[in-house]
């Protein structure tokens, strides 16, 4: 008997060692190994920049997304920056570092946008992209009459022609670039450093209002920049702390209207659910971790339990403006989401260009889990079917400028599945799904006029589709 016990304990010990070893290998492989920045006190600005660039050159030690050709381009860009270190403006240096960090065209790698934009100047207005163009969505009080105007030209060039040229400074796909380029438009120094506008400290805008009235405004930059404004549709109608702290009176769209939309309601609340007409259920997830008061796994389990007992005719999973998080917290429910609707029901996955990272992965799991009963609604997501991620949120920090540079360690392929253990994120290899090529099934364009009137075009499209579907069922 003792021998049997010893054998069992020995086997359990071996299993424990194997599990511990595998877990250790997983952590070692996918935890970014951020190189140490060991530099003396720089003698001047030029030496400070050279130290920063020398440290930036070590980015591929931590970031695994570089191809051989991209590595050559990366080093060539840093060579050029080092040669111009003594003559560059601050904006040219910041944008040069951004270009080097964006060489891999990977949305998870590269320079932090907030850290970049806070170093540059800013106009007394802010912008946001709608389907009908770039609009001014907030402004200092003295320019409040410009709110809602569409930008026809920015420095003499149509913004639709300008934003693709910012691709060299920003990773990710076109949807992500377009959405986030609104922040660059608020800082003309960034566009000037990129060679896209003539002067860095003012811009002339040709504008048109909803009533067709045309005007031209020349706006100088603020003496003290207010700071970064994240361009997400759920946030453009509420104040930011940087605006409150600036000492200026900032105006924005009437929150009573924009918060009437499904995406705008309860703007501080990451997770929210409700019932819908015609037997529907609604889940909104602003991120994939929840918050301290409401962790996502428990919240999702509660939502799913209710629908297992009483399946919905249709379920809306609203992932618009979902910044990401830890997709394993939503994986199990999303993979089995088809169990939560009736046999002929639908799962509507609602996305936009702000749907990113773990938000995208959650969408893929839900689309796979619902199969032929899944409908992708809204607009394309902020990354492609293949991308690098898993940097752990720990950036490199350039030692003198403190510019944050994020890195990626694990590859994702949600179109074909990810089976290459040498570079795929191992959780994907074990538990991932292959969803094929994904395109929006039910486009739902959002114009500024709809947004300002509190119309949620994504939800309206779903309600119309359900009315038609259930109407057909009733007549069969």
Image: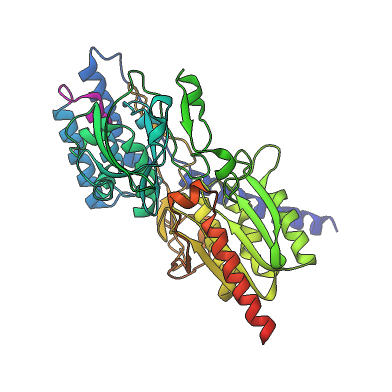
Q: Is residue 23 visible?
A: yes
Please name the residue shown 46% across and 27% down the image: 250
Q: Which residue is located at x 20 percent, y 46 percent?
A: 72
Residue farthest along the bottom direction in this orientation? 476
Residue range of the region highlighted in magenta in the rendering: 85-94
Residue 410 location in percent, x, y? 44, 51
**x, y (%) of residue 143?**
38, 29
Q: Does 297 appear above or below 460?
A: above
Work out whether residue 204 or residue 388 is closer to the camera in this orientation and state it. 204
Indicate the position of residue 205 as horizontal and vertical percent values: 26, 37
92 magenta-colored: yes
Can you see residue 365?
Answer: no
Please identify the quadrant where the N terminus is shown: bottom right
Q: Is residue 30 magenta?
A: no
Query: Is 83 positioned to the left or the right of 333 in the image?
Result: left
Q: Nearer the viewer, residue 474 or 142?
A: 142
Q: Is residue 315 above or below residue 223?
A: below
């Amino acid at each position: 008997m003792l021998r049997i016990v010893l054998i069992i304990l020995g086997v359990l010990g071996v299993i424990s060692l194997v599990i511990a070893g595998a877990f250790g290998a997983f952590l070692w492989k996918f935890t970014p190994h951020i190189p140490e920045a060991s530099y003396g006190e720089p003698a001047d600005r030029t030496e400070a920049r050279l130290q920063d660039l020398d440290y930036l050159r070590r980015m591929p030690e931590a970031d695994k997304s570089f191809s051989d050709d991209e590595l050559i381009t990366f080093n060539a860009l840093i060579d050029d920056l080092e040669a111009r270190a003594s003559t560059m403006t601050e904006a040219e240096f910041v944008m040069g570092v951004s270009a080097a960090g964006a060489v891999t065209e990977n949305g998870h790698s590269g320079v932090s946008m907030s850290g970049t934009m806070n170093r540059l100047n800013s106009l007394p207005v802010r912008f946001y992209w709608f389907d009908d163009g770039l609009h001014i969505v907030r402004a200092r009080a003295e320019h409040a009459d410009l709110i809602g105007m569409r930008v026809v030209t920015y420095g003499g060039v149509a913004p639709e022609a300008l934003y693709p040229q910012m691709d060299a400074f920003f990773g990710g796909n076109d949807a992500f670039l377009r959405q986030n380029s609104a922040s660059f438009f608020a800082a003309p120094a960034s566009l000037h450093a990129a060679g896209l506008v003539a002067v860095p400290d003012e811009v002339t805008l040709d504008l048109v209002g909803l009533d067709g009235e045309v005007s031209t405004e020349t706006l100088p930059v603020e003496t003290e920049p207010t700071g970064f404004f994240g361009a997400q549709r759920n946030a453009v109608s509420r104040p930011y702390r940087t605006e409150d702290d600036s000492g200026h009176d900032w105006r924005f769209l009437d929150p009573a209207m924009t918060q009437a939309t499904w995406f705008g309601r309860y703007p501080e609340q990451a997770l929210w659910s409700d019932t819908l007409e015609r037997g529907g259920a609604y889940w909104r997830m602003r991120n994939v971790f929840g918050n301290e008061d409401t962790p996502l796994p428990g919240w999702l389990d509660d939502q799913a339990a209710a629908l297992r007992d009483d399946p919905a005719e249709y379920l809306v999973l609203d992932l618009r403006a979902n910044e990401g998080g830890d997709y394993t917290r939503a994986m199990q429910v999303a993979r089995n989401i088809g169990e939560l609707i009736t046999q002929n029901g639908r799962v509507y996955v609602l996305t936009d260009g702000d749907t990113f990272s773990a938000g995208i992965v959650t969408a893929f799991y839900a689309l796979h889990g619902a199969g032929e009963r899944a409908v992708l609604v809204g607009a394309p997501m902020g990354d492609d079917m293949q991308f690098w991620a898993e940097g752990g949120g720990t950036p490199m920090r350039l030692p003198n400028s403190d510019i944050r540079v994020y890195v990626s360690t694990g590859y994702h392929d949600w179109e074909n599945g990810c089976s290459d253990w040498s570079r795929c994120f191992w959780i994907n290899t074990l538990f991932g799904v292959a969803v094929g090529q994904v395109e929006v099934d039910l486009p739902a364009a959002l114009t500024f006029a709809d947004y300002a009137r509190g119309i949620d075009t994504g939800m309206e499209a779903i309600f119309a589709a359900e009315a038609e579907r259930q109407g057909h069922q009733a007549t069969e």
